[in-house]
Amino acid sequence: MHDVRTVTKPSMRRLAAASLAGTAIEFYDFFVYGTAAALFLGPLFFPAFSPVAGTLAAFATFGVGFVARPLGSVLFGHIGDRRGRRPVLVGSLLLTGASTVAVGCVPTYESIGVAAPLLLLVLRFLQGLGLGGEWGGAVLLTAEHAPAERRALWSSFPQVGPALGFLLANGVVLALSATLPEAQFAQWGWRVPFWAAGVLAAVGLWLRSSLAESPSFLDIDDHARVPLVEVVREHWRLVLLTAGALSVGYAIFYSVTTWSLAYGTERLGVSRTVMLTCIMAAVVVKGALTPVAALLGDRYGRRPMCLAGCAAAVLWMFPTVALLATGEPLLMFTGFLGALIAFITMFGVIAAYLPELYEPRVRCTGAAVGYNLGGVLGGALTPIAATALAEHGGRVPWGVGAYLTAIALLSLGCFALLPETRPVPVAVAKPVMD
């Protein structure tokens, strides 16, 4: 029997705020590594490599986090489907925060040799493991408390968290790189954003300490013994479709926020400050538009929004790389903004769409595995593939545009095969007249 005190319905504003803050903190941890990989981890941990090879090696350690995310979704999804969504929020935040702080303590290659990049690899894996559980816990807790007619809106608040996490991570790096001499930044300044994760994790744990358990979980009478087995046996097609559908979102986001940062500073000679400012400005608009996309999803449906965003991505990937190649701040910002608007048109409704696709008894595992497998397809490979393609291209990296367009077409096909899930309003019955 569950304690009846745990089913008291919380304020949706408070729940959404706590979920948003938690995802912002966890994605801060994840994104600060991506920015570091693009800008300075190569020379510090792979000094024997050429600049391009060093960036590729740093992006490879970055990609390990995405490989770990589906494993984290299996681990924490099992806990979420068996023990509840709340334990997932605490465990994932602790793991991600501790591993991020530890990254800031790793000695460089100059101090301990090959052990330095190996330690980075292990800690990045642990980061990904924690983040793989975070999305399922935070999104499900919000989505399963929300009223059906506004589920996309309330569920979109955890989806704003990644934008805030990205802005916070890059804002800290930008402030440090702008105020510290290059020598001091290389010696110890780069470590500060990772150490800050400890303070943020403590804040997140405090915010989440009193959240109520999901009513959908409490209503389950027969919990799945091994949720992953049930998901693989009965929902494998749905998992593959959702992973393929979501891959374009990851590809867009990390090509804009990670690969383009490295490409702009290394190949185009644009300053770190200008690149970060252009990307961060586009992310601000994307974060502000997230609730708008969610409201449209509540009104017109989840699937139409996803199809529209995918179609926009197909049309906009070549203009994005062409505008980036100009090196002009306003044009680069325009390219980034168009790509991120296409992205949020889809991902503004995903936090409602994925939970609605899976039955409650395996929802934490199924939705999180599908979501994070999409990250492997679109997020782990994109910075590596884009860097390699751009290296062998001309001034405009058309190969990167073709790669991103192909992923968008794949996702468009997958979304076309998924059903609509928006709850249909119950019509008020008219009295029968005699």
Image (spheres, rainbow, N blue to C red):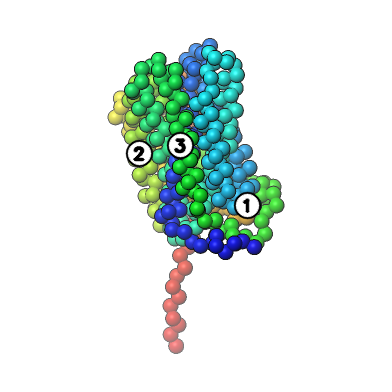
Mark 1 residue type: Arg
Q: CA distance from mark 1 to mark 2?
A: 36 Å
Residue at mark 2: 284
Mark 2 residue type: Val
In this view, 415 is above or below 213: above
Q: Residues within 10 Å of mark 1 (few under 14, many from 20)?
A: some
Q: Tell me whether the residue at label 2 lies in contact with that at label 3, contact meaning CB atoms closer than 8 angstroms.
A: no
The mark lying in front, picked from 3 and 1, is 3
Q: Earlier in the sequence, mark 1 or mark 2?
A: 1
Q: Which mark is residue 83?
A: 1
Mark 3 residue type: Val
Residue at 59% over, 52% down:
84
Front residue (pair 10, 43): 10
Q: Is residue 416 left or right of residue 178?
A: right
Residue at the far left: name it.
330
Residue at mark 3: 199
Q: Earlier in the sequence, mark 2 or mark 3?
A: 3
Q: Position of residue 70 (x, y in %)?
A: 60, 39
Report the quarter where the C terminus lies: bottom left
Q: Earlier in the sequence, mark 3 or mark 1?
A: 1
Front residue (pair 91, 402): 91
